[in-house]
Image (spheres, helix red, strand yellow):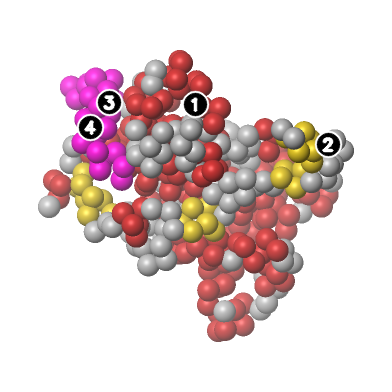
Amino acid sequence: MTGDVVTEYCFPKSYGLLDQPDFAPDFHDLWISILSNSHVLKQFPWMFPMMLTFPEWFVDRYLPDLSVNYKWHREWRKQIQDVKSGDDTDGREKRGGRPSIFEPLLDSDLPPFDKSVGRLVEDAQTMVGAGSITTSFSLALGTYYILSDASVLEQLMEELETAMPPASYEALSLVKLEKLPYLSAVRLEILRFSYGVSHRLQRVCPDQAIQYYDYTLPPGTSISMSSPLIHDNLSIFPDPRTFKPERWLPLETTGARLQKYLVAFSRGSRQCMGMHLGSAEIFMGIAGVFRRFGRRMEIVDTVKERDVDISHDLFTPMTKKESKGIMMRNCADS
């Protein structure tokens, strides 16, 4: 779902991953391939552009793990070229006349290099990855924890069934969903549990010293931290590895105080530019799925230590390598 949403915003057309019989597993494989090399590529950033210069026949034969990158880079390049050439009529009509993300960039006064196909392909990779992997992980993790706690499930279902009664069921707008207190608390707890990006995000103050208690950090010092250090801090979030939406309630007091410690989207001028889209997907995704199937879903073939708990950091949180993901079943189909 998240891949379809973000590509709808970025390109002339959405990838339609949900319409494919197997939900396009190579799209997931692409990001696993990229993220698996994130630590090496961070230290040697020239490696990835160099690898993309290899001939396709060479990659297909000798570097099969890289071939999925080639496939999707070709797709992004084609989409960007369609936008540059103005071949986006059908896409605009489906979006209700709204331009894709790249059209305003191309119409701006940015330098020519920043409008080149190569540069925009890099931007496409960043936006598609950031807009799909993190939010999809949050939704999967949230679904698991809601279904794992009967009390959380019951409170969420009561609120959703009251807001969207069966007799006149219709999907609520985002504005109305945001006014549901328990759903809002569930969203905040999902963001706390899923971390957003688990890797250290560096910040540098180039021309001023920073005073931190008794320490003076000179200008140009690289400072970084990871979100789990805050989200799992016992002094801020007691019993941090227990999924407790009620810790955020009431939203106007306790929730408002705790939200300053929520850094799933980072903070400051470098915070995630898609944070409102990501939050909307969690609101609408959780509400839509649980209102329809919440009392009929069950977890199957899922081991918490293997498929849920964070095992390692590959820029984003990762479970154990042998995990096949969190599995659910509609009880009505069993």
Q: Which residue is mark 4?
A: 151
Residue 52, given in percent of the width and then of the height, sits at 67, 70
Question: Is 284 inside the magenta-drawn segment?
Answer: no
Q: Which residue is mark 2?
A: 209
Question: Visible in this render: residue 107?
Answer: no
Q: Can you name the residue that lies furthest to the front here?
A: 214
Q: Nearer the viewer, mark 1 or mark 2?
A: 2
How packed mark 1 is, by other alpha carbons closer than 10 Å (few <14, some 14-19, many 20 or more), is some
Q: Could you say which disc has been placed on residue 258 in the image?
A: 1
Q: Is residue 83 above or below residue 38?
A: above
- Chief secondary structure of the magenta portion: helix
Residue type (three-letter) at the residue carrying disc 2 = Ala
**Cβ atoms at labels 3 and 2 below 8 Å apart:** no
How packed mark 4 is, by other alpha carbons closer than 10 Å (few <14, some 14-19, many 20 or more), is few
Q: Looking at the image, is mark 3 or mark 2 earlier in the sequence?
A: 3
Residue 111, given in percent of the width and then of the height, sits at 84, 46
Tell me what residue is drawn at x 39 percent, y 18 percent.
250
Residue type (three-letter) at the residue carrying disc 4 = Ser
Question: Label 1 to label 2, Cα distance in Å?
Answer: 29 Å
Q: Which residue is mark 3?
A: 160
Residue type (three-letter) at the residue carrying disc 3 = Leu
Question: Is 158 inside the magenta-drawn segment?
Answer: yes
For the magenta stretch, what is the residue range? 144-170
Q: Looking at the image, is mark 1 or mark 2 earlier in the sequence?
A: 2
The quadrant in which residue 282 appears is top left
Decide which of 6, 74 is in the foreground and name it. 6
Question: Label 3 to label 4, Cα distance in Å?
Answer: 14 Å
